[in-house]
Amino acid sequence: MRKEKPSKTAYKVALNILTLGAIPEMSEVLPAGIVDATAKLLVSSGAAGERTVRWAKSSKSVLVSRAFDWIMPGQFEAFARRKAFFEDQVRKGISAGATQVLVLGAGFDTLSWRLAAEFPWVDFFEIDHPTSSLIKANGIESMGAQPNLHFVAGDLVKRRLVEVLTNEEGWSLDATTIIVAEGFMQYLPPEAVQDLFTQCALISDGGRIAFTYIPSRLNGSPDAGPWTGLVLLLLKLGGEPWLWSIRPEELESFVAVLGWKYSPGLITSSCKQGLEFYAVATH
Ligand SMILES: C[S@@+](CC[C@H](N)C(=O)[O-])C[C@H]1O[C@@H](n2cnc3c(N)ncnc32)[C@H](O)[C@@H]1O
């Protein structure tokens, strides 16, 4: 991806959250407070102006998003369910005793910021590309920094996770950690994904990882729905190509050799929404 600008895909997810908030049924699915927090973050970080935010929240924007849903069928509303899924996983993880949350490729997601205030005894760490991380940290600073929310800048293809977290103030190797990788893994090359799971196992003894993944077609390429060729081309042209995908039936053995136990029983919702599959693994 192009490093000098914040992630376009993260920006699009955030705008979708605002638009979903304008649909009554979806605002019931979305986690409480997410729409306002996302709007504030986009403006305070300078990623979007007030006018863009107003447009994204409008009924016209809902119509446009629905009109373009044929490109990735079901994906627009899936973003609301995805946010609900990860929030549920983190809340359950904290109830089960986790005291550290690590969000990989956090983008403009506001889960850590919202939950950091509610759970002051839990430390939240977010990693993203340096440009995306910096712009977000600045935005959060003006919204109200939380002492237990830490921003870590790092390219997880160029630097290994353990190295990125070493010397990070407050990071504990002993804490029970829940790792979140929402809409993230598909942007990494396959060898980086494998290494990342191994690294995650090293830093998360007794913890769990919740993630989404894109299923593979029979030929091994990502299955982006009926318009796969077009979608993959657009992502590539946008500078954020999808590089990794896996067939759902291969996931259990894939994570097992990397130190994780695939745990579908921990998913209470449907394990597929839009184009993406949800997964949880424990260590
Ligand atoms: C589709 S966005 C998802 C953002 C967020 N997780 C969400 O769902 O709202 C993908 C995110 O992964 C980040 N990302 C992609 N490749 C990365 C890498 N090699 N190292 C760190 N972050 C990366 C991007 O900067 C972007 O914020």
Image (tube, rainbow, N blue to C red):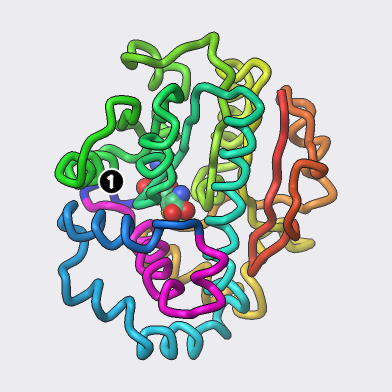
Answer with the quarter of the image where residue 69 lies. Answer: bottom right
- Looking at the picture, does residue 91 appear above or below residue 51? above
Write the residue at 51% across / 44% down: 188
The residue positioned farthest toward the front in the image shown: 118
Q: Is residue 241 visible?
A: yes
Residue 87 position within the rendered picture, expressed as x and y whole percent measured from the top left: 55, 47
Q: Nearer the viewer, residue 50 or 167?
A: 50
Mark 1 sits on what residue?
132
Disc 1 element: helix
146 vs 226, left or right, is left
Q: Nearer the viewer, residue 220 or 18?
A: 18
69 vs 167, left or right, is right
The reply to whether the magenta stretch includes residue 28 is yes
Write the residue at 62% across / 78% down: 73
- Looking at the picture, does residue 17 appear above or below residue 89? below
Write the residue at 46% across / 57% down: 32
- Looking at the picture, does residue 27 appear above or below residue 276? below
Quarter containing the C terminus:
top right
Q: Main secondary structure of the magenta part?
A: helix
Residue 28 position within the rendered picture, expressed as x and y whole percent measured from the top left: 54, 68
Region rendered in magenta: 5-30
The reply to whether the magenta stretch includes residue 107 is no
Q: Nearer the viewer, residue 247 or 104?
A: 104
164 vs 91, left or right, is left
Query: Mark 1 is on which residue type?
Result: Ser
Q: Is residue 160 visible?
A: no
Residue 147 position within the rendered picture, expressed as x and y whole percent measured from the top left: 28, 26
Beta carbon at label 1 within 8 Å of ligand 1:
yes
- Looking at the picture, does residue 199 appear above or below residue 60? above
Answer with the quarter of the image where residue 118 lies. Answer: top left
Residue 280 position within the rendered picture, expressed as x and y whole percent measured from the top left: 70, 40
10 Å neighbourhood of mark 1: few (<14), some, or many (≥20)?
many
